[in-house]
Image: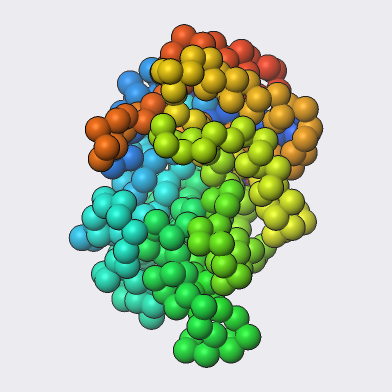
Amino acid sequence: MLSVIWLLAAATPLTALAQKILPPPDGFIYHSAFPDFGGPEDRVTEKRITDFESLAKKRIVWAYFSNNWKKRIKFPSKAIQTIYSHGTIPFVRLMARTNFDERPRRDTKYRLRKIIRGKFDKQLIAWAKKAKASNIPIMIEFGTEVNGFWFPWNAKWNGRRHKKKYGDPDKYDGAERFVDAYRHIVNIFRSENVQNVTWVFHVNARSFPKKVWNEMQRYYPGDDFVDWIGVSVYGALDSNSEWESFTEVLDEAYPKLAAISATKPLAILEFGVDERPLEPGKKAEWIADAFKAITSNRYPRIKAISYWHENWPNSSGTKTKLRIDSSPSALKAYQDGVANDMFTSVVYLGN
């Protein structure tokens, strides 16, 4: 069964028969965003969503935010209801971290081995029950940018290159632990018969460190556990970073993404680039290049895009400006890009 919800109006109540987010038909791509939900990525308000949509001059299909586990894993009911009441799909990043601290290090509380052993099952079961009771279509990812060492679920902090200290002696322990943790969480939701969740696997376009044990495909939980595959595609994030075009980054990653699964739809879950005041127009060119490539069928399996709309201060005293309104030229480039009818605000739901 297939049903459609039009996102230019208030959300329509959905039946339990149609609650998975399907890819749009051929020729269409979902338009979505992280609409500046603040530093900890969880300050969800309807105003932040409408502000972004007013700037973009187009509605978004999903609003992307973080569910930071901190001291206890809790279902973000208020955030999910706020997003859904706006007529938008809530997309939750399950962030297994105690603190919102981006210094690369192990999180001793939420180690993958503890998730696998069931230490947090009670809290995850409660999360799953509340998700089911909401009857709201929810997208969920666990292990954001898993092939990046900056997050504690990366293999660097969970077994790295070893093969014989856990599980299959032919597999790298770090990636294998992630796969098992991801599957464990999905299986909890299945045990509660949760039908309204769409599962997403999310990698960075490039693996850091660039080691064989950290290759993106090693983390894939398998087609039976994943509905969508997503990627982060960023350009320069500060004035000291090397400038690369959107296509330079994604051209390298796309074949690897497509090889992970022959059937799953692909999404650009995060993309953006810094504004460089001393080089006016450069960000606008980067954005225009991105939209030109996406709409030219260069990456035919990309079925959704989601812009990371945020500015943040750096320790150097500078500020990274990813917001689409960081300059008039950047804003116009984004508006012109999403004005293409290929980018849709209509979500397709089914089983």
Tell me, yes or no, if residue 24 can be seen here: yes
Q: Residue at x 26, y 69 (%)?
A: 109
Return the x and y of residue 241 as percentages of the image width and height.
Answer: 46, 38
Tell me, yes or no, if residue 13 can be seen here: no
Q: Quadrant of residue 297?
A: top right
Q: Quadrant of residue 298?
A: top right
Q: Residue at x 74, y 51 (%)?
A: 255
Q: Is residue 264 above or below residue 314?
A: below
Q: Is residue 80 above or below residue 170?
A: above
Return the x and y of residue 223 as percentages of the image width and height.
Answer: 67, 62
Q: Is residue 68 above or below residue 332?
A: below
Of residues 250 and 209, the one nearer the viewer is: 209
- Looking at the picture, the colour scheme in use is rainbow
Q: Residue at x 58, y 89 (%)?
A: 169
Query: Which image quarter is the N terminus in?
Result: top right
Q: Is residue 48 shown left or right of residue 88?
A: left
Q: Is residue 303 above or below residue 111?
A: above
Return the x and y of residue 258 as percentages of the image width and height.
Answer: 73, 52
Of residues 260 and 192, the one nearer the viewer is: 260
Of residues 273 and 18, the one nearer the viewer is: 273
Q: Residue at x 60, y 64 (%)?
A: 215
Q: Is residue 104 shown left or right of residue 21?
A: left
